Image (cartoon, rainbow, N blue to C red):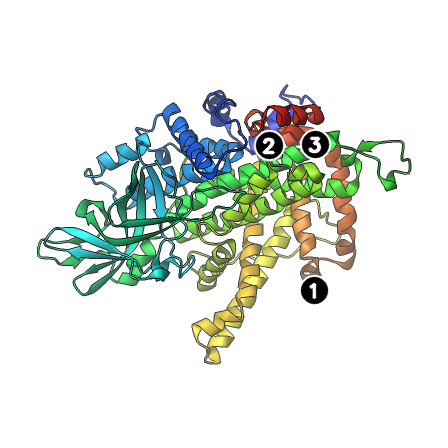
């Protein structure tokens, strides 16, 4: 379909996913992610698979200019992360750990220091590969409970890194691959004399091409089959770390051994060690949105070619594409809709200019990351299930993408913890003011109106916030401790934060869709986004009904309205799938092709591609 401007519907809608700078970069991305380099050979051993991941990391590094850290080339970094996620989720993980968290830590906590230039150059060349060693086996994702110690040795102006017990081993850094030199960013509790100075990051060589460095013990662990990474348990026994490898931020130790820090307490310092996690949230959001896009596009394309002689067709001799069935449309167009929403949210996070480091902006980033992760989990699973037995085939990528989505539910704090952190800051009013609960429009309103979406999601956030604050206030008045006050209200807190995320997403949708100049493209985009938003509203229709925000007639109308939206999406579904900008040549899923049976047979004969 060609619109009035001469641009195709697909090209116009793809602006929801990417800006003009991406279009200019696309040919270069095609060169970097050559199908020959990113073929998926079968029969590899675990060590061979790990080696391939790091070979690909070096390949990408060799194809781009990293003399300026990629974190400072955001318009290049995020497209590279997207394509890496769709080409090879294990590579994506290694790539973002190297360029975002490892180099990011040096830039974040070693700011304005020229004595780290050689380290940055070494990392930029990937002669060593970076890793993050933050979480510990005995304390899960609780970085505040880190037990690894870095004791300052004044006589040698060094730090001695020690793991005090099995609960303090670092788990699960991906540093187990043989023959790959690794440098880690290790979080440890700094001790100067008898003083506990809080958590800091240290640059620590973990292994060279021959094996573990002196004092470092690496115990390889089993890797999940759907996201193969060289996981390990790492412990330290008297590892000596030079003073310059202390990423000291605003702290210092004088010649007489006196520790000083602009932050007044160890607790405040320990919180600062998590600043680098924002790079995780940004990178994860982009990669998760990418695999949601890939899954939805593959499944929708396949459903147009996959024929069935269903009982409900009424004629067993007549086959029809499964996409004709409304239940398939609700699943697959729902995945398509959610993939667009995730892509638009990731586009906001991955803007050329990073968000300001205010409490509100940081909360927005991690709340959107949690929402995108939940979308990616739903979309990857729904796309796989809707594709039948071929959805379970590794060649068709759903399992790979599902593995990445599941992994990031825990990485960089779990989605639930992120929501609870958001709720905590919002309940305290930290850079947050609850939105106005405006009067809803007249009874003849349309649930397809984006203004109604905003009113409903705003009212839900406002009222759940009021309920949470009121409940916490009553609990404190009754003499409950802060733990007990929150402990029975975590469910309410999570629902409030999820409502906040829903409102944020509606705001993103309205901004991005309204920016489309073509009336026809705007109409199609609004229709596909409506499916996601109204599905979310229907999920909570009981609450909206109880609050008087939906009428009984509106609540009953939602299933039929979702079917209407599916019927309107159907003629444009393939254009919408292609507007998600999935590079099928490197994804390589046979079922994304029109003649998927021939493509799958050829792939099976020659070895899986993509």
Question: Considering depth in this image, is 195 or 53 the residue closer to the camera?
Answer: 53
- Quadrant where the N terminus is found in the figure: top right
Q: Which image quadrant for residue 74?
A: top left
Q: CA distance from mark 3 to mark 1?
A: 41 Å
Q: Going from the N terminus, do you reach mark 2 or mark 1 first? A: 1
Residue behind mark 1: 546
Residue behind mark 3: 302
Q: In this image, 420 relative to 158: left or right?
A: right
- Circles 3 and 1 in contact, beta carbons < 8 Å: no
Question: Considering depth in this image, is 94 or 516 the residue closer to the camera?
Answer: 94
- Quadrant where the C terminus is found in the figure: top right
**Furthest residue toward bottom:** 478
Which of the two discs, 3 and 1, sits closer to the camera? 3
Residue drawn at x 30%, y 60% is 268
- Residue 487 image point, x, y percent: 50, 70
Using the image, determine if residue 4 lies above or below residue 77. Answer: above
Residue behind mark 2: 580
Question: Considering depth in this image, is 169 or 25 the residue closer to the camera?
Answer: 169
Q: In this image, 558 relative to 455: left or right?
A: right
Q: Which image quadrant for residue 305?
A: top right
Using the image, determine if residue 162 lies above or below residue 123. Answer: below
* Callout 1 secondary element: helix
**For the image shown, how many numbered marks are present on the structure?**
3
Residue drawn at x 68%, y 48% is 534
- Circles 3 and 2 in contact, beta carbons < 8 Å: no
Using the image, determine if residue 162 lies above or below residue 596. Answer: below
Which of the two discs, 2 and 1, sits closer to the camera? 2
Residue drawn at x 68%, y 43% is 385
Residue 113, numbered circle:
none
- Residue 598 image point, x, y percent: 69, 23
- Residue 308 in view in this figure: yes
């Amino acid at each position: 379909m060609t619109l009035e401007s001469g641009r195709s519907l697909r090209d116009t809608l793809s602006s929801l996913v990417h800006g003009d700078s991406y279009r200019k970069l696309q040919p270069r991305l095609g060169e970097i992610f050559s199908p020959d380099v990113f073929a998926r050979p079968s029969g590899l051993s675990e060590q061979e698979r790990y080696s391939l991941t790091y070979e690909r990391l070096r390949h990408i590094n060799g194809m781009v200019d990293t003399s300026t850290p990629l974190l400072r080339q955001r318009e290049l970094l995020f497209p590279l992360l997207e394509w890496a996620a769709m080409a090879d989720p294990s590579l994506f993980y290694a790539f973002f750990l190297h360029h975002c968290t490892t180099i990011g830590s040096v830039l974040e906590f070693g700011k304005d220091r020229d004595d780290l230039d050689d380290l940055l150059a070494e990392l930029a060349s990937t002669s060593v590969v970076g890793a993050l060693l933050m979480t510990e086996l005995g304390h899960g994702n609780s970085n505040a409970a880190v037990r690894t110690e870095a004791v300052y040795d004044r006589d040698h102006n060094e730090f001695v890194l020690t793991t005090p017990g099995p609960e303090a081993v670092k788990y699960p850094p991906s540093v187990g691959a043989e023959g790959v030199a690794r440098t880690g960013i290790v979080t440890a509790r700094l001790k100067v004399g008898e003083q506990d100075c809080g958590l800091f990051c240290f640059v620590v060589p973990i292994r060279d091409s021959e094996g573990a460095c002196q004092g470092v013990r690496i115990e390889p662990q089993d890797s999940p089959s759907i996201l193969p990474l060289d996981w390990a348990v790492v412990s330290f026994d008297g590892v000596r770390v030079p003073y310059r490898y202390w990423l000291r931020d605003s702290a210092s130790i004088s010649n007489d051994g006196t520790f000083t820090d602009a932050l007044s307490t160890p607790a405040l310092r320990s919180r600062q060690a998590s600043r680098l996690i924002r790079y995780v949230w940004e990178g994860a959001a982009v990669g998760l949105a990418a695999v949601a896009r890939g899954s939805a596009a593959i499944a929708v394309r396949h459903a147009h070619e996959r024929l069935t002689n269903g009982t409900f067709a009424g004629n067993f001799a007549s086959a029809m594409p499964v996409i004709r069935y409304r239940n398939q449309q609700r699943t697959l167009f729902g995945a398509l809709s959610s993939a667009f929403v995730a892509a638009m949210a990731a586009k906001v996070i991955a803007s050329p200019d990073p968000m300001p480091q205010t409490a509100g902006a940081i909360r927005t980033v991690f709340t959107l990351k949690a929402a995108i992760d939940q979308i990616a989990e739903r979309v990857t699973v729904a796309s796989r299930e809707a594709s039948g037995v071929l959805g379970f085939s590794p060649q068709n990528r759903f399992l790979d993408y599902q593995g990445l989505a599941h992994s990031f539910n825990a990485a960089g704090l779990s989605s639930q913890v992120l929501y609870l952190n958001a709720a905590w800051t919002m309940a305290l009013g930290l850079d947050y003011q609850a939105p106005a609960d405006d009067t809803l429009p007249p009874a003849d309103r349309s649930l397809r109106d984006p203004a109604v979406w905003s009113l409903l999601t705003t009212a839900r956030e406002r009222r759940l916030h009021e309920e949470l604050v009121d409940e916490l206030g009553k609990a404190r008045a009754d003499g409950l401790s802060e733990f007990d006050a929150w402990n029975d209200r975590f469910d309410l807190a999570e629902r409030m934060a999820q409502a906040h995320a829903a409102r944020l997403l509606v705001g993103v949708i309205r901004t991005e869709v309204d920016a489309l100049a073509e009336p026809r493209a705007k109409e199609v985009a609004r229709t596909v986004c409506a499916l996601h938003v109204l599905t979310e509203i229907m999920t909570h229709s009981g609450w909206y009904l109880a609050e008087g925000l939906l009428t009984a007639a509106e609540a009953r109308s939602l299933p039929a309205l979702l079917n209407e939206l599916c019927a309107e999406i159907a003629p444009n579904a393939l254009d919408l799938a292609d507007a998600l900008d999935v590079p099928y040549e490197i994804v390589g899923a046979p079922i994304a092709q029109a003649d998927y049976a021939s493509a799958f047979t050829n792939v099976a004969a020659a070895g899986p591609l993509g």
